[in-house]
Image (tube, grey):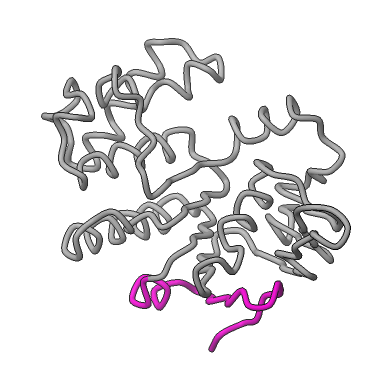
Amino acid sequence: MPAQHILEVHHLKKSVGQGEQALSILTGVDLLVKPGQTIALIGESGSGKSTLLAILAGLDDASSGEVILLGEPLNRLDEEGRARLRARHVGFVFQSFMLIPTLNALENVELPALLRGESSETSRAHSRAMLEQLGLGKRLHHLPAQLSGGEQQRVALARAFSGSPGILFADEPTGNLDRQTGERIADLLFSLNRERGTTLILVTHDAGLAARCDRRLRLQDGTLREVP
């Protein structure tokens, strides 16, 4: 039977510093996410949204509480175990694209698959198909510097979805793009979500992007509140 929740968060807290200098960022976050849901994390700058996203993805540690991602309690996994979980089941899209400048579009997309141990023939075929689906069939061999911002973000999307992740974390995926290009990227993001059933959790300041999600959660004073 499929798991009811792809992500569970229980009593999550995060603080930095020690003693009187300690700063509480997350004071008690609870969250249940069903497979295939789209969720927007919204809130003021500095409220801790990116910190929360990093903890949910296993890229950072909480001070206390529990995160269960795809049935795996992250606090019980060492870094190698977390890395294996991310490589097999988790995708990432960042505001800054995070492409390797010396690799062309096709090489950037296929690199995670090669690191997962897929054959070069299989990974190249899947990567090529993903880029063609996103309208980059004629840009396969271009370096990131030869691509526009929107094209670079499409490469990042292709890389994120190339392994058919169960969950995708996106941190301001349209933040570095002009409005028209950002809307196109958002269309692609939600289209891929619908086609593949991938759960999407994104941090955004874009009200229009947030409105397209199934749920909107505001991070304020260290806790999450559902927004109608």
In the foreground, 213 or 208: 208
In the foreground, 130 or 170: 170
- Where residue 50 sits in the image (x, y, percent)? 56, 56
Which residue sits at x=47%, y=53%? 170
> Could you say which quadrant of the image residue 156 lies in?
top left
Q: Is residue 220 magenta?
A: yes
- Where residue 69 sits in the image (x, y, percent)? 72, 49
- Where residue 114 sits in the image (x, y, percent)? 48, 16
Total marks drawn?
A: 0
Which residue sits at x=84%, y=43%? 75
* Residue projecting furthest to the front: 20
> Could you say which quadrant of the image residue 4 lies in?
bottom right
> Could you say which quadrant of the image residue 78 lies in?
top right
Q: Magenta stretch: give its range.
A: 206-228
Q: Is residue 46 shown above or below 164?
A: below
Q: Is 135 situated left or right of 105 in this image?
A: left
Q: Is residue 98 shown above or below 201?
A: above
- Where residue 100 sits in the image (x, y, percent)? 35, 25
Which residue sits at x=42%, y=34%? 162
Q: Is residue 193 shown above or below 38?
A: above
Q: Is 91 situated left or right of 31 in this image?
A: left
Q: Is residue 8 magenta?
A: no
Q: Is 141 situated left or right of 190 in this image?
A: left
* Residue projecting furthest to the bottom: 228
Which residue sits at x=40%, y=16%? 122
* Residue projecting furthest to the top: 120
